[in-house]
Image (spheres, grey):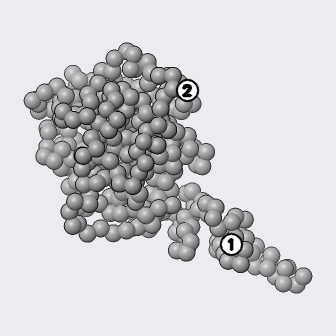
Amino acid sequence: MKKSIIKRLFIKLSKIIGYEIIDQSDFSSPTLQKELNEDLSIINEKSIIIPLGEVKITKKVNSVLIIFRTNTDVEIWDQNKKRLFEKPKIEYSLRALNSLIKSINFSKTKYPNIKFKTIIVDDKSKEENLSNIKKLINASGLDIDITSLNHDKYKSIIKQQKNDQTFSNLASLLQCFELGKEYSEDLVFFVEDDYLHFEPMMEEMIASYERIASQVNKDIFMCPADYPYLYMNNVKTNILIGNKRHWRTINQTLCTFMTTKALLNKYWDNFYNTCLDRNDPFEKHLNEIYTKEFCISPLKSLSLHLTNVNSSYGLSPFINYKKLWDANKITDA
């Protein structure tokens, strides 16, 4: 009886002074009132990973602006190859948006106090395709707006290109960056319409951002995909612990990544210059940023870039591609 009273007092005192207790005898945390196989972290407050302990969150997330850019006609930009499964491009756009919606809704149940806003930048979709996109939006229950790509706005800004596809790609990317600069308040996630996302993607991105950015004490960049081309050179990397998986430092991304409003403003010239001409590589000016700032990608992947099966910029390793593809089929589209 005496031991029980002392134990309760000790638990109460620990909670008051901000410590958590682990009872390994019954695999629980009395202070958190959870079993150890549950999620022990508290968003915007602390990240707890057994056996590494607790990280106090100093880089708190209050809102996420998602900017999703679509072109529902071009099969693979700048290539004549077919994508995995060899379907019309609209099929990839719809499944990509469906998977993103699922991931946002999943995250909203975990983090109800974080504000999510999505803007779709659409490049001249046919009315039928646009109608199917709107059906998904209307059924989502999310705050999602559609805006059309303004080609005329960028004709005097972007250098003349060899074909309309390249110009449109540069223009849509610049419009996305400008929207991020204007409307983001905290995190901003630029995402293309040929990525399928696992349902916990957004949750893991947010919680891992808070933990890792708090540890390194600076804003960071995050890529949701584990690209195969990252393994083709003998480049040294650091392995970090995120929320529920490992992350690795990288020095290259494509154009799907998450960062902060502060870093978008700090490196605006790099973002802007990426879109003025077809660079080699395309993301040259973005990659320059990663020589100065942390950029990380997950192990294993949170998102799948659906390109050709042989593309080094595409399919992440150790993923059941068919299962993820089937899980995001639009039944009434």
x, y percent for residue 203:
51, 50
Q: Residues within 10 Å of mark 2 (few under 14, many from 20)?
A: few
* Quadrant housing residue 49: bottom right
Q: Label 2 to label 1, Cα distance in Å?
A: 41 Å
Q: Residue at x 75, y 79 (%)?
A: 10
Front residue of 92/185: it is: 92
Q: Is residue 35 visible?
A: yes
Q: Give the label on residue 27, or none.
A: 1
Q: Residue at x 38, y 37 (%)?
A: 67
Look at the numbered disc 1 and give the secondary structure of its residue: loop
Q: Is residue 100 visible?
A: no
Please state which amino acid type lies under the numbered disc 1.
Phe
x, y percent for residue 124:
30, 21
Q: Give the label on residue 139, or none.
A: 2
Please state which amino acid type lies under the numbered disc 2.
Ala
Front residue of 195/215: it is: 195
x, y percent for residue 224:
39, 50
Q: Residues within 10 Å of mark 1 (few under 14, many from 20)?
A: few
Q: Is residue 14 above or below residue 165?
A: below
Q: Residue at x 9, y 29 (%)?
A: 162
Q: Quadrant of the N terminus?
A: bottom right
Q: Which residue ends up furthest to the right in the rendered image?
A: 1
x, y percent for residue 29:
69, 70
Q: Is residue 87 above or below residue 2?
A: above
Compared across the picture, whether 36 is left or right of 93 comes to: right
